[in-house]
Image (tube, grey):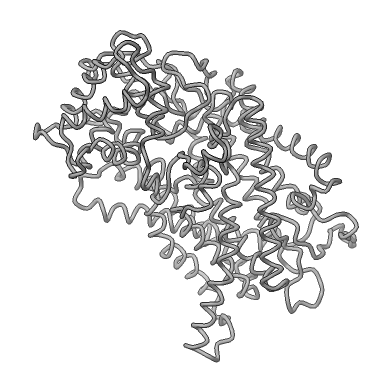
Amino acid sequence: MLPSSTAPAPGSNGGAPRYHALDSLRAVAMLLGILYHALLFGGGMGSMFGGTPGPDARLMEWIHSFRMPMFFMISGFFCHMMLTKYGVGRYLSRRWWRLGAAVLIYLTVIAGIAWLRGGQNDPFSPRGGGPPVGPGPRGTAEGLEARQRPPFPGAPGGAPQGTGFNPGGPMPDRRGPDAPGGPPPGGGFGPGMILAGVLTDAADGNHDQKIAREEMVTVAGAWFRKFDAKGSGTLGAEGFATGFAGVIPGPPGTEGPGGGPPGGPGAFLGRMFGPVYFAALDGNHDGSLTSTEMTEGFLRWFSDGGGSQESGITQDQLRDVLNRSLKMPGGPGGGMGFGQSSPMAERLFGSWARQFNLGPMWFIWYLLVFATAAPLLAWGWRWIAHRIAPQSRGPAPGSVWRLLLVPVLLALVTLPARMATTSYGGWSLGGAMGIFQPIPDVLFRFQADWPFYFAYFLTGWWLFSAREQMSRLAHLWIPFLTVGFATYFAAVRFSETFSSMTGLPTYPWLRITGHGLFAVSGAFLSFGFLGFFQRFFDRPTRTGRYLADTAFWLYLVHQELLIQVILPRLRPYSLPWWIQSTVAILLVGVVGCLTFELLVRRTPLTHLFGPPPPGRRKVPKGATGEVQAVPSDRSVA
């Protein structure tokens, strides 16, 4: 769990330390995650795959741009504080026990619930109440270019034909798992999720919900001719990815000159999955693809999936064989398999391997890695610094305006790391890379977004060394937030204008600029809110203390409550997005606080998910009615 800010600072006079602002801000960062997911699963997910984002999607993306980076920065501060307080051995044992035990309990409970319900531990499962997936019209391969594009069949965030994407409003009810073009029972998240639906939609000429062998051959030839616009007879990886983007349906009215949506699902998914499909189809691995190779590859998927001349192959079978056979060498950002389970995980858990994934607890695993690596890195840095400048005794006070350089440097350091990950749209911050990877696979894989989040963690680690200067941030919250908001709006406009113009000669520089604006925005917003809380919330209060105590538990239970219980019951009312989100958050708060009081506060679970036991926590009340903080480390960072 996160070390609480109520632990006394080394060298203090024994009074209450002034870390209440960070403790409150960390709780707010976790509670913002509840709002983010209420918007995401309540309708905003559609904006990731195309369409014009509504206000809910705009708010969701803005929260995502700084929330978790800021959380890791605050966690780095408190982890360094704990290391100074306890020493290396006790610090590491506490981190691994508090965080590791919480993850194990979560995985056991969630996977058990999924097993009892026959569903999956992912937000796209039909049983999970995720966004609806609607059917698309069937058509022949020959009519592929002329047919009306359905809204992204077989993928999350789609909608029934005729409704299009509706990211700015509530999602309609999910169709049953047996509906034509609908999701397979149990979800099936992975690279096959995309191609299976699009292929079935294009190839199923007789509308029998199966692809015959001849239909597979026909669509392979039609797609190759469509991808090979110049008629050269061969395709490179880039040309294949561009052509693949063009066959992925987008929201009506968003198609670009080449047929594919300029900034919608085709642009993103073509970059993500195109190289993987190309590598699987390139039989002789010479870097080029012929029509024969493409047809042979399609037929290989057909036979490996159980297809025959008599029975054909269903969309479910095609999806499963693609998920098994297509390996993601880089995934969305590189260095990981996307929704794939290794032979090790399958030996341990069998067909339930994908149930045991980190899900919303991904940040705990990241935090464990960072908290373990930081002391070693800090020791190496001190050793080098001592050799270079033996008389150095820590950060120099300097002018208050020199603190403006810190977020600038943070943005520069994190820029290459941001560019190594792929976002859902444009150049904004992508999703967590380790979120859908099964246990134990995720424990042995490098995550492409580790360098980005670790840079923020180390910034917080450094802030503890410069904690005497932190009060100065309170004087800079206005310029910090001004720069953060201004660069964010500029980044959004810049990304929407140029991110799809991959053919421009200056595209590499435009990409660096777009990512750079988002990097500057995230860094300045993080420091701006830190300064704002230093200015107005650096005092102990009962409300702040209760939020800090319950934030981890609320975050732990909120996603399953939203996906499984609350949002499926709110969607039929077609409420405006802001009312639906408000009601969902209030219900999560009520249920979360009740279960916290009943299951956590007065039980042994309080050692993992709650505040210290009452006997160890004194809360004297001063003349102003404020609660004074006392030493504790039972919280999540």
Numbered-mark total: 0
Horizontal and vertical percent for residue 526?
55, 58
* Above or below for 271 versus 28: above
Foreground residue among 302 and 420: 302
* Above or below for 312 versus 62: above
The residue located at (60%, 18%) in the rendering is 572
The part of the image, by quadrant, that contains residue 4 is bottom right
Q: Decide if residue 579 is in sight here.
A: no
The residue located at (69%, 67%) in the rendering is 91
Horizontal and vertical percent for residue 456?
52, 61
Q: Is residue 334 left or right of residue 573?
A: left
Query: What is the quadrant of the C terminus in the image?
Result: bottom right
As drawn, the residue found furthest toward the bottom would be 391
Q: Is residue 120 left or right of residue 103?
A: left
* Above or below for 487 versus 286: below
Q: Is residue 14 left or right of residue 568?
A: right
Q: Decide if residue 203 is in sight here.
A: yes
As drawn, the residue found furthest toward the front would be 347
The part of the image, by quadrant, that contains residue 14 is bottom right
Horizontal and vertical percent for residue 165?
43, 25
Query: What is the quadrant of the N terminus in the image?
Result: bottom right
Foreground residue among 417 and 471: 417
The residue located at (56%, 59%) in the rendering is 369
* Above or below for 226 versus 144: below
Q: Is residue 394 left or right of residue 417?
A: right
Horizontal and vertical percent for residue 163?
43, 18
